[in-house]
Amino acid sequence: MKRIFLLAGICAGIFANAQNTIVLQADKGKDIINKNIYGHFAEHLGHCIYGGLFVGENNTRIPNKDGVRLDVIDALKKLKVPVLRWPGGCFADTYHWKDGIGPKKERPSILNVWWGNVKEDNSFGTNEFLNMCEVLGAEPYLSGNVGSGTPQELSDWVKYTTHPNGTSPMTDLRQKNGRANPWQVKYWGLGNEAWGCGGNMKPDYYANIYRQYATFMTSAGKERIYRIASGASDADYNWTETLMREIPHNMLDAVGVHHYSVISWNKKGSATAFDEELYYTTMQRALEMEELVSRHAAVMDKYDPNKRVAIAVDEWGGWYDVEPGTNGAFLYQQNTMRDAMIAGTTLNIFNNHCDRVKMANLAQIVNVLQAVVLTNEEKIVLTPTYHVMEMYNVHQDATMLPVAVTSNDYKMGKEKLKAVSASASKDKNGKTHISLVNIDASKAQDITINIEGASYTSVSGRILSSDKLQNYNSFENPDKIRPAAFNGAKLGDGRLTLSLPPFSVVVLELK
Ligand code: AHR
């Protein structure tokens, strides 16, 4: 008798472990996945701006328009970058925007004190950034200097960039600098990491400063400006609570949150040489985003049940040691399939929380941290993270469809994580997309997706996978990892079945 029970138990264990199930509620879509969840971040740090996005107008080796690299812009256009945060980061609270306008030879040089004390010649400033955003088709998100600036300085920046012609000395200055009409600049950050590099402030103090700065940021254009408070680091829920309580909501559109997937701040580890245990720890850090977003949102629900104020996760991504031989302050790191796993799972979390998360900005766009593009002189490489962002851009501005995922565990010793993550949406053309990630480093995951509330007649898909987690695209072998067609999903009887290879990302399209 005992043996029969044991056998039954083992069988149940095997079956429970073999099949993952997802219920897709195709007729329960309500919230829009704001395209800005697919946003990016560009800081004056290392070679993000200089060498990455901008090579200078006089560069004859690297094709550029007004100094902006055409190869990088071309790649980013395919990504459909919706919003780009600039000029920092920590740099933002040291940046005085008037240093970066007007004739280039008259612009002062400064030291970039946060990032290696290198010379910042201000040759890439407000006009260059905003013109680049127009070429890219991305909305700018300007991060204002609250740490070492003044309310007047930020108020002037708003006027210089957005107010109609001939309405103030600032708009005259804009005209003198060759730009008659205002740009469209909706998104404004009031400082960055005010609890740290932005001024080491306490939350109450920052809330007061925020109110003061916000008061003088006046919109005179067609569009109301959207003000984003410098948000919490990770799980500092008290920070969010203080801002929600102390700042009137008519002057607050979003509260930031920053979270990096870092193994440990003292020992980050190599971006490419890591074992499965380190990979596992990175994924634990990445998946913490679910709890962070849920708990910051719960705090906000207390003060803003109608969800008017959004969460902007305006810095996220993997952070490792810099590549050997590169400047430690430049944060240049390679990007492997591990980063594809961070990107796929994190974007699924944001999609599923799109009722509150309205913006997110991957750190950073080129050559810094979890970059989508790496450059080396005239060469560029699209990273695995680029490919995930490109595959997922079908979700931009689509209606989120709820998914209930029952997943096998991915175990390491006594620890366990869910192996499978998913999100889904229906776009304006009626197509449904499901993005799926299997983070398990060695086991494929068989998945059944039960479809409720819709019937589909065709399925197609794309997959990003590789034979080693540590694989990456290099300047010598730039296409080692790229998306391929995925024909492994079978549709029938109101369900989809498929098998996800270890550490892979799949995006399915259903019609
Ligand atoms: O993205 C790099 C840095 O990380 C940013 O400048 C800062 O905001 C954060 O600590």
Image: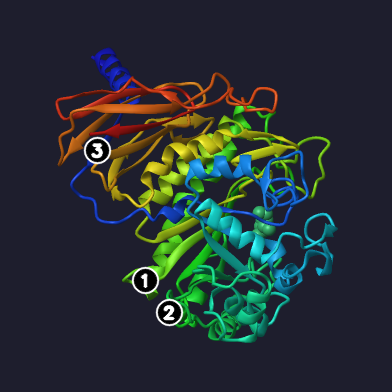
Q: Which mark is residue 343?
A: none
Is the CB of the residue bearing disc 3 within 8 angstroms of ligand 1?
Answer: no
- Does label 2 point to a residue whose CB lies under 8 Å from ligand 1? no
Mark 1 vs 3, N-terminal side: 3
Specify the color scheme. Answer: rainbow
Q: Residues within 10 Å of mark 3 (few under 14, many from 20)?
A: some
Decide which of tag 3 and tag 2 comes sooner along the chain.
3
Q: How many angstroms separate mark 2 from mark 1 (CA)?
A: 8 Å
Ligand 1 lies in quarter: bottom right
Does 332 sit above or below residue 301?
A: above
Q: Is residue 457 left or right of residue 285?
A: left
Label 1 residue near ligand 1, CB within 8 Å? no
How far apart marks 3 and 2 lie (CA) works out to 37 Å
Q: Is residue 55 left or right of residue 463?
A: right
> Mark 3: which secondary structure?
strand
Residue 451 x, y percent position in the rendering? 20, 35
Badge number at residue 308: 1
Q: Nearer the viewer, residue 154 or 315?
A: 154
Q: In this view of the protein, which residue sits in the foreground, 322 or 82?
A: 82
Residue name at image x 40 percent, y 23 percent: 485
The residue that appears at 30% across and 33% down in the rendered structure is 509
The residue drawn where x is 78% and y is 56% is: 115
Closer mark to the observer between disc 1 and disc 3: 1
Please name whichever residue, 428 or 25, is drawn nearer the observer in this view of the structure: 428
The residue to which callout 3 is attached is 23
Kind of residue at badge 1:
Arg
Q: Quadrant of the C terminus?
A: top left
Amino acid at the residue labelled 2: His
Q: Position of residue 41 (x, y in %)?
A: 59, 54
Mark 2 packing: few (<14 Cα in 10 Å), some, or many (20+)? some
- The reply to whether the C-beta atoms of the residues labelled 2 and 1 are less than 8 Å apart is yes
Which residue is label 2 attached to? 249
